[in-house]
Amino acid sequence: MNLILLKLKEVFSIKVGIPGGLLYYRYETFINTFLEELEIESIFSTETNKEILDMGVSCCVNDACLPMKIFHGHAAALNEKCDYLLIPRIMKCENSESICPKFCGLPEMVMSGIKRKEGVITYPLYLNRNKEIKHYLRKIGKDLEIQENKIMAAYKKAVNNHKLQIQGIKDQGYRFTIFLGGHPYNLYDRFANMNLIHKLHSYGIGVITEERVSDNEKEAEIKPLMKKPYWLFYKNNYGAGKYLVKDQGIDGIIYISSFSCGIDSITIEMLKNDIGEFPFLILKIDEHSGEAGIDTRIEAFADMLERRKLH
């Protein structure tokens, strides 16, 4: 009897698909904990690979950036495997900053690209107010027929785990240390950035990312600006990069940027203008990027750091 009930549960359980791209890299712990606490059968796409990218390119608009195309590929890979596809419409970030406007229209872009009209969770999400986050999660619970008290208990556990998680990278013991700037989905997607961090380590270059610089330290560098930055990742990367240069805790900066990203372009120019003569390498990536070209530029940058230390 127990075996029969178990099989029935497997047949009738709701499967929620979680595309492994974009801000999944930032909120992975929260998402995973929340779904585990609710005992929802969640299906995650695999790490990005050539097949995922090809699917994304084929179903996404041509002028979209590489991360958007990769996200479309992850969604396409899950399309036939789940009852619901979770694609949040992120409107505001934690401290009321904004992100790329494409996030607001992401659900429509993906639904059009993968030809799916139903079973997509697309409610707007405001991360700057706990009240709005709870409201968003209650809507999901209603769709999945889960009691509100369970939703709130899972939310509390997910928040706690997210706060306990040590985000970002701060390498120790390398000959050089550089600030690695960029959006999290460019920094932590090893396929998109062609395993950049591993390549840097092979040249004796350690990495520190913006998450390991405190909010207070970032805010202190942003304060002299004429206007508070509008974009979350501009604020984080500009503030962290400028602080680390001033603190003399790094030997250089590498910024990995999606081709045609307007926010990255502003961040890079502001940093270049404010840090003066300092080793700064910009790596632009898209679906046509060649690994040999990236390797050559990293090698040249490592040689420059070596010469700079000697002289």
Image (cartoon, rainbow, N blue to C red):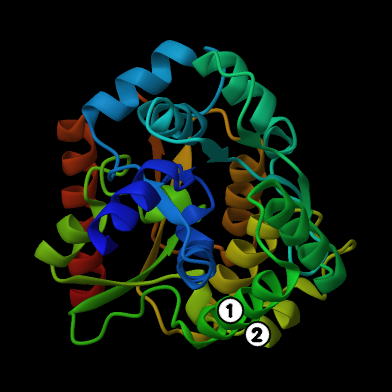
Image quadrant where one finds the N terminus: bottom left
Between marks 2 and 1 in the image, the one whose residue lies nearer the viewer: 2
- Amino acid marked by disc 1: Tyr
- Residue found at x 44% / y 70%: 209
Is residue 194 placed above or below 51 in the rendered structure? below
Secondary structure beneath dot 2 equals: helix
Q: Which residue is mark 1?
A: 243
- Residue found at x 28% / y 80%: 171
In this view, the residue in front, 266 or 95, is 95
Secondary structure beneath dot 1 equals: helix
Residue 203 visible at all = no
Q: Characterize the local packing of mark 1: few (<14), some (14-19) or many (20 or more) Cα atoms within 10 angstroms.
A: many
Residue 175 visible at all = yes
Image quadrant where one finds the C terminus: bottom left
Task: Answer with mark 2 or mark 1, whichever residue precedes in sequence.
Answer: 2
In this view, the residue in front, 68 or 82, is 82
Q: Residue 271 placed where, x, y %?
A: 60, 58
| Residue furthest to the left | 202
Q: State left or right for residue 147 relative to residue 275.
A: right
Is residue 140 placed above or below 166 in the rendered structure? above
Q: Characterize the local packing of mark 2: few (<14), some (14-19) or many (20 or more) Cα atoms within 10 angstroms.
A: some
Q: Residue 151 placed where, x, y %?
A: 67, 69
The Cα atoms of the two marked residues, 2 and 1, are separated by: 7 Å
| Contact (Cβ within 8 Å) of mark 2 with mark 1 | yes
Is residue 301 placed above or below 21 in the rendered structure? below
Is residue 99 placed above or below 120 in the rendered structure? below
Q: Which residue is mark 2?
A: 217
All told, the count of numbered labels is 2
- Residue found at x 74% / y 52%: 142
